[in-house]
Amino acid sequence: MTSRPLYQGTGPGTITPDGCAVDYYAMLTPHGEPELVHAAVPEAASILELGAGVGRITHSLLALGHEVVAVDESPEMLAHIKGAETVPSPIQTLSLPRRFDVVLLMSFVIETADDELRRAFLRTCRDHVADDGCVILQRKSPEWYDTVDVFERVVEDGHVVRMAHVERPEPGLLNATMEYTVGDRRWTHTFVSRRLEDDFLAAELDAAGLTMSGFLEGNREWVRAVPQVG
């Protein structure tokens, strides 16, 4: 394990404990994620969205007819969410008195390099999903870890996204720094990410009382799991 902190962030405005810039994330829009989730779950499903941030996905899920409870450890992030119940809490310590049709853990949160933290995330998912429900996780496809390198591209409204640094300190582990520039504002986000092979993730899910049941699309970025019952 690297000795570097798992997450660091810099830039104007509030930076969350995992290094994310609230002001930057508040500018972002969905890119098909809500529709992908909507197509994979029942109509009007109750959804627990873990790590909901500013509601980039939450608001679209609400518009698609779902009931959403949005969880994030950052009150500043949650302040941007309208129309959903919000719960300020770390994912790993969440304990709500109900279960949901769907538990959603997006934004590659599951790829934390802290093994105990990842297992705690999965336990939270199992504790809050209904016995006939499902858990949907978003990860990078394992192959991404072999090919990703520094890059720069211009995206929404002309702002610039750069992967400024990539380091592979050991097999399956990635240290990277992203830079985001919008006008005269600039943020950085440094993170350590763990490659999750299918077999490894299936074993981690199994230990949490969940069974990997498939993928939402061909690139294996979106993983579906169901609870083990009995």
Image (cartoon, rainbow, N blue to C red):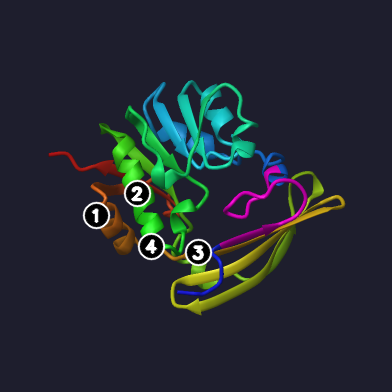
Look at the numbered disc 3 and give the secondary structure of its residue: strand
Label 4 packing within 10 angstroms: few (<14), some (14-19), many (20+): few
Quadrant in the rendering for residue 191: bottom right
**Range of magenta residues:** 7-22
Can you identify the residue that label 3 sits on? 193
- Amino acid on which the number 1 mark rests in the picture: Ala
Where 20 falls versus 132 (above or below)? below
Residue that mark 4 sits on: 115
Dot 2 falls on a residue whose secondary structure is helix
How far is the residue under mark 1 from the one under mark 3?
21 Å
CB under 8 Å between discs 2 and 1: yes
The answer to which image quadrant residue 189 occupies is bottom right
Residue 163: x and y in percent read 67, 65
Asked whether the beta carbons under mark 2 and mark 4 sit within 8 Å of each other, the answer is no
Label 1 packing within 10 angstroms: few (<14), some (14-19), many (20+): few
Left or right of residue 98: residue 78: right
Q: Nearer the viewer, mark 4 or mark 3?
A: 4
| Mark 4 / mark 3, whichever is N-terminal | 4
- Tell me the CA gap for discs 2 and 1: 9 Å
Residue 122 image label: 2
Q: Name which residue lies at 52% across and 70% down.
A: 174
Q: Earlier in the sequence, mark 3 or mark 2?
A: 2
Q: How far apart in space, not on screen, are marks 1 and 4 (Cα)?
A: 13 Å
Q: Are marks 1 and 4 in contact (CB under 8 Å)?
A: no
- Give me the residue at 26% from left, 59% from top: 203
Residue 216 appears in the rendering = no
Mark 1 / mark 4, whichever is N-terminal = 4
